[in-house]
Amino acid sequence: MEDVDLNTREMKKNIYVRLLGEGTVVYRPVLAIEISENLYKIQGKEIHDPDDEAWEFLPESVVVVQRQELEGEQVFTAIKGQIEH
């Protein structure tokens, strides 16, 4: 899913964040704002429930993404957190 907010010119896209403590590798799709190539700021405050799921990277985190195949589809997965300056 891609969406451009005409007011802020932000490019939004679903990226996939790994869920921790699931016993197997599981990802949660979450909307993120593209900051630069392969760098996104995770959104999703409204869907994040820390009592239900442990996300590897929390909403508002800035992450590096890489293209990966999940269930036969090429998607961006969050692989590393970044520190904002």
Image (cartoon, helix red, strand yellow):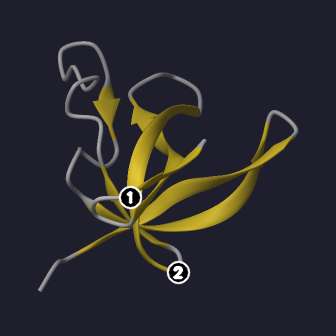
Residue at 52% in and 75% down: 38
Q: Disc 1 to disc 2, how far (Cα)?
A: 20 Å
Residue 28, percent from left and from top: 49, 31
View extreme (left): residue: 85
Quarter assignment of residue 50: top left
Residue at 33% in and 37% down: 55
**Placement of the N terminus among the 4 image quadrants:** top right
**Placement of the C terminus among the 4 image quadrants:** bottom left
Where is 22 relative to 25, above or below?
above
- Local packing at callout 1 (Cα closer than 10 Å; few below 14, some 14-19, many 20+) is few
Of tags 1 and 2, which is closer to the observer?
A: 1
Residue under circle 1?
Answer: 6
Residue under circle 2?
Answer: 37
Quarter assignment of residue 9: bottom left
Q: Amino acid at mark 2?
A: Glu
Q: Is residue 21 left or right of residue 76?
A: left
